[in-house]
Structures are given as C-alpha cells and as structure tokens.
Image (spheres, helix red, strand yellow):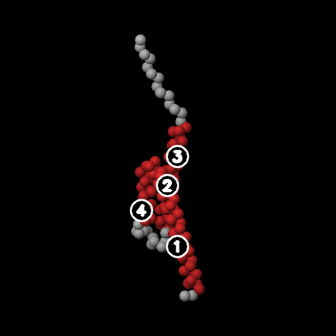
Amino acid sequence: MSREAWVLVVLAAVVAVATLVGAVLLAIRVVRTRRMLGTLGAGGKVAFYGALIYTILPVDLLPDPIYLDDMGVLAGALFYLGRLAAKHRAAQRVTRDAPATPLPAAPPRRP
C-alpha cells in the first residue's frame, strides 16, 4: 500500500476509536442516571431504556462502524433526562420552601 493509503487507514481507525469511546462514555452517563428513574416518571423510563436498546441492538440508521447515530440518541436521552431531573429538583425546592399551610381552625365547642 502507498503511504497515502496508510495515512487514510490510520486516520479512519482513529476516528472510529474516538467515536466508539464517545458512545461508550455517553452510555455510561445514561446508565448513571438510572437511579433517578423512579422519580422521573414514564417519559424518563422510556427515554432511558429506548436509548440503551437502540445503542445495543445491531439495527441502526447508519452502519455500526459509524457510531454517530448511537451517540446522537444517547446525547438526546441525556439531554431529555437532564431536563426532567432539573424540573423534578425545581418542584422539590418549591414544595420544600413553601410555607406550611396552617390547619383549619376547629369549630368552637358548644357547652
């Protein structure tokens, strides 16, 4: 092989490894958000499991040496789960900081 062909092969291998590492790192971040699934509702569970299943299954929009579609799905799931978690934290802050409503006064007793 010529020198130019080797350069292209090495460059393609570096790009493939970089995208694989990126996809693995995104998958790890998605798995770490699993502990919040109980509080995020059904939408969070669908985003989490859907992203993982799409990444693991061999059926892809792009051939598997190109992990850009997997990375896009994982990044989208992380973005969505992050927004859900932020909304959940804000709702918890509001309920925690809200003043306690006083109990209604008991009706006066008749003698």
Crowding around mark 4 (Cα neighbors within 10 Å: few <14, some 14 to 19, many 20+) is few
Spatial CA span between label 2 and label 4: 15 Å
Cα separation, mark 1 vs mark 2, equals 26 Å
Give the amino acid at mark 3: Arg
Q: Residue 53 occupies which quadrant of the picture?
A: bottom left
- Up the image or down, 28 lies above or below 103; here it is below
**Sequence-earlier tag: 4 or 1:** 1
Q: Earlier in the sequence, mark 3 or mark 2?
A: 2
Q: Which residue is mark 1?
A: 16
Q: Amino acid at mark 1?
A: Ala
Q: What secondary structure is found at the residue carrying circle 4?
A: helix
The amino acid beneath tag 2 is Thr
Among numbered discs 1 and 2, the one appearing first in the sequence: 1
Q: Quadrant where the N terminus lies?
A: bottom right
Please say if the residues under marks 4 and 1 sit with CB atoms less than 8 Å apart.
no
- Which residue was labeled with disc 3? 89
Q: Which mark is residue 33?
A: 2
Q: From what the image shows, is residue 67 above or below residue 86?
A: below
- Residue occupying the point 52% across, 53% down: 82
Q: Secondary structure at mark 3?
A: helix
Q: How many numbered marks are there?
A: 4
- Mark seen at residue 46: none
Tell me if mark 3 has few (under 14), some (14-19) or many (20+) residues whose alpha carbon lies within 10 angstroms of its own.
Answer: few
Q: Position of residue 24 (x, y in %)?
A: 51, 65
Q: Label 3 vs label 4: CA separation?
A: 27 Å
- Cα separation between marks 3 and 2: 14 Å
Residue identifier under label 4:
53
Which residue occupies the extreme bottom position in the image? Answer: 1
The C terminus: image quadrant:
top left
Q: Earlier in the sequence, mark 1 or mark 3?
A: 1
Q: Amino acid at mark 4?
A: Ile
* Earlier-in-chain disc, 3 versus 4: 4
